[in-house]
Image: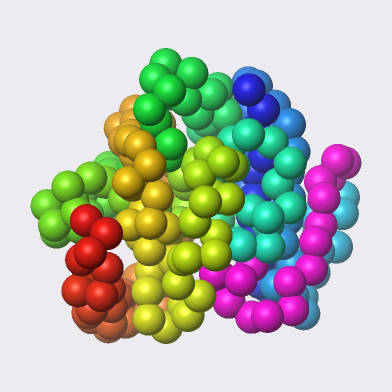
Amino acid sequence: MKVSVVIPVYNEEKQINNCLYSLMEQEEKPDEIIVVDNNCTDKTVEIVKKYKGIKIIKEKKQGMTPARNAGFNKAENEIIAKCDADTILPPDWINNIKKDFFQDSSIIGISMPIRLSDVPITGRSTALFYIYMLIPRLMIGIYPLIGPSYAIKKTVWNKVKDKICLDDTKVHEDIDLSFHIKKFGEIFFNSKTIVDSSARRIINNPLSFFGEYIFRFFKMYYTHRHLI
């Protein structure tokens, strides 16, 4: 079982080095790393080029969804693992992803808890993640895939890639993907594989994160209710 890692990037020169370093330090190395340059104007791509063996592809259409889709379509292996540029991965991340898929053939996706490493109030806790995900968990019945870290089978991606929503302003692209793939098998929640991510979205724009983000979820839930 081989794993392709996809990382969409847009002006991530301050974050990408830590993310890639955590990938290089994996106990079991990824079989492929694809960084999707989504029109970077800073030194992000220059930093990525310092790491050997990383494929860099260009996606001119701006947005997380088109950048992610470009990377997933290029991925060559049976498992696609996705992380954000500001994610720092535990050393056993790849190993745990492979173990989870191997243990049960009905698993088609893996979600994981997120720890916001730069929020002083929570420290090393995942409390904010579980609070924030309480409503989606109750309404959807699962912990959905979350952008900073998840994995899916390439075969399942091929089944839904022409059906998923493409407008970042109307959906959360990761939860939208969860809606579309859940009918094909189990989205397994591995509570022990905890990844660190930045709280910059909350810090820089709290009203959007706790207002518009939540409103978008309920709107998306209504339009996707036929998939539940």
Residue 63 sits inside the magenta stretch: yes
Q: Residue furthest top?
A: 103
Figure disc tally: 0
Would residue 220 be seen by someone viewing this image from the given angle?
yes
In the image, is residue 99 above or below residue 213? Answer: above
In the image, is residue 94 above or below residue 148? Answer: above
Q: How is the image coloured?
A: rainbow
Residue 56 sits inside the magenta stretch: yes
Residue 208 position, x and y percent, is: 32, 82
| Front-lying residue, 43 or 66 | 66
Please give the name of the residue rendered at 28% of the width and 82% of the height, measured from the top-left corner.
Answer: 212
Please give the name of the residue rendered at 33% of the width and 57% of the height, measured from the top-left corner.
Answer: 179
| Front-lying residue, 10 or 117 | 10
Q: Residue 11's image quarter?
A: bottom right
Please give the name of the residue rendered at 54% of the width and 69% of the height, measured from the top-left corner.
Answer: 65
Residue 160 position, x and y percent, is: 49, 56
Q: Quadrant of the C terminus?
A: bottom left
Q: Is residue 220 left or right of residue 99?
A: left
Q: Quadrant of the N terminus?
A: top right
Residue 224 position, x and y percent, is: 27, 68
- The magenta-colored residue range is 51-67
Residue 182 position, x and y percent, is: 33, 47
| Front-lying residue, 157 or 125 | 157
Q: Is residue 26 left or right of residue 58?
A: left
Would residue 127 be seen by someone viewing this image from the given angle?
no
Please give the name of the residue rendered at 46% of the width and 78% of the height, measured from the top-left corner.
Answer: 168
